Image (cartoon, helix red, strand yellow):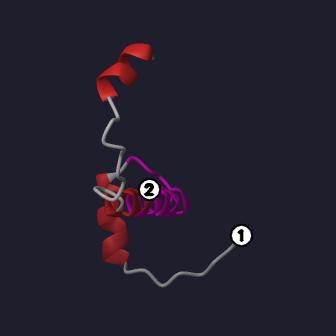
Amino acid sequence: MATSLNISDDLLQEALALDEQTTLDALVETALREYIQRRKRLKVLTLFGTIDYDSDYDYKQQRSQA
């Protein structure tokens, strides 16, 4: 899909210097993949501490069965 983006040339050049990407298309695709990955991790972090286990849950026994 062809899309026109208005991105600062300085920003693009700095990003190209930091990565091994040789084309702007590859650079933008990598940046989007990393952005999506980061956002998904942040969503998982919001779940931290929200899962309650039964009081009789024995994680050591569960590990030994695996």
Q: Nearer the viewer, mark 1 or mark 2?
A: 2
The residue lying at 31 percent from left, 75 percent from top is 10
Sequence-first disc among 1 and 2:
1
Image coordinates for residue 44, horizontal then vertical, percent: 39, 57
Is residue 38 highlighted in magenta? yes
Residue lying at 44% horizontally and 56% vertically, measured from the top left = 37
Residue 46 falls within the magenta-colored stretch: no
- Per the image, label 1 sits on a secondary structure element best described as loop
Disc 1: CA contacts within 10 A as few (<14), some (14-19) or many (>=20): few
Tell me where residue 35 appears, x and y as whole percent: 42, 63
Disc 2 residue type?
Gln
Q: Quadrant of residue 8?
A: bottom left
Q: Residue beneath label 1, please?
A: 1
Residue farthest to the bottom, as pictured: 6
Front in this rendered view, residue 45 or 17: 45
Q: Tell me the crowding category of disc 2: few under 14, some 14 to 19, or many 20 or more residues within 10 angstroms, Cα based.
A: few
Vertical placement of residue 60 versus 38, above or below:
above
Residue lying at the far right of the rendered structure:
1
Where disc 2 sits, the SS reads: helix
Q: Vertical placement of 13 versus 3: above or below? A: above
- Residue at left 37%, top 69%? 12
- Quadrant where the N terminus is found in the figure: bottom right
Q: Does the residue at mark 1 contact the one at mark 2 (Cβ under 8 Å)?
A: no
Camera-side residue of 38 and 65: 65
Q: Main secondary structure of the magenta part?
A: helix
Q: Residue 6 at what x, y percent from top left?
A: 48, 85
Count of marks, rendered view: 2
Of residues 59 and 19, the one drawn nearer to the viewer in this rendering: 59
Q: Which residues are magenta?
A: 20-39
Q: Which residue is mark 2?
A: 37
Query: What's the amino acid at mark 1?
Result: Met
